[in-house]
Amino acid sequence: MLGIKLALILFLSREVLSKRERDPEIRPGYYQGDILNRGIKFRNGIGNKIYHWPNATVHYVIQPNVFDEAHLAKIFEAMADIMSKSCVVFKLATKNELPFALNITGNNDGCNAMALGFRTSLNGINLEPYPIDQGCFRMGSILHEFLHALGFEHQHVAQNRDEYIRIEWENIDKEYFVNFVNEDKTTTWHGFGEPYDYDSVMHYVPLAFSRNGEPTIVALKEGNHRMGQRFEMSKTDIRKLNKMYKCHGHV
């Protein structure tokens, strides 16, 4: 009986560990791993102003009774980082602003955004309450989801990506091919005059959606040693954000 109990404990421990080791930004069932509503393809940055937050102001509300003080402090630190490096402002939503507010939740698995950019509804990001500096509560992961909400897609789908990376399709399950396709030529896309950025906090990790443990993204040029980093916005991320929101004096 003791042996059976021990085996069960080990099995459950492996299950919990396995769940925690998954990249929380790369989940099956989400477009590109962390976007709930696919919508229009924008190929990195939304150029259409109707999807920019009015007056560069993000009114937000945080789901109660989910985050402890340390998690809240990390969320506010990410907001402060964006505000210190751009003209974008985060403000707690009033009752009248709630219908259009960014809902910051933590009750679902992983870290993901409901949609890209400002919407008349569907404004929201989810940050699963991992331990601080792990999973969704790495600073770069919080910034990553905020940048989705502000209007940025992943870097690896920029239309000039084939000059900088090679997609290893044989290492990706066919059901996830859609997360790597960038052949859409019909909609407005915008790199805001900035070069491809391996260092972007919006770049996929090299093993994203790998079916066999082999790389799905291979860099073709130098300067790629931090590809997929989740520490901070890169200098290019910051310039793009300021160009998108026309932040005079910040670019």
Image (tube, rainbow, N blue to C red):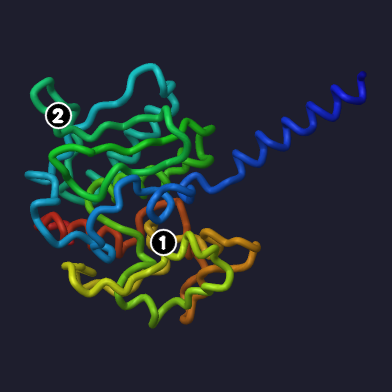
Confirm whether residue 72 shows in the render.
yes
Residue 196, percent across and down? 34, 73
In the rendered image, which residue does mark 1 sit on?
179
Disc 2 target residue = 99
The residue at 54%/32% (across/down) is 131
Q: The disc labelled 1 sits on which kind of residue?
A: Asn
Gap between marks 2 and 1, in whole Å? 30 Å
Quadrant where the N terminus lies?
A: top right
The numbered mark, 2 or 1, whose residue comes first in the sequence reads: 2
Within the image, what quadrant is residue 83 found in?
Answer: top left
Label 2 or label 1, whichever lies nearer to me, is 1
Measured as percent of width and height from the top left, residue 38 is found at 30, 53
Label 2 SS: helix
Q: Amino acid at mark 2?
A: Pro
Q: Residue at 20% x, 68% y: name it.
A: 190
Residue drawn at x 37%, y 75% as measured from the top left: 161
Quadrant of the image containing the C terminus: bottom left
Q: Give neighbour class at mark 1: few <14, some 14-19, many 20+ (Cα, 10 Å).
A: some
Q: Position of residue 31 (x, y in %)?
A: 38, 53
Mark 2 closeness class: few <14, some 14–19, many ≥20 residues within 10 Å: some
Q: Quadrant of residue 5?
A: top right
Tell whether 211 sits left or right of 180: right
Foreground pick, 85 / 34? 34
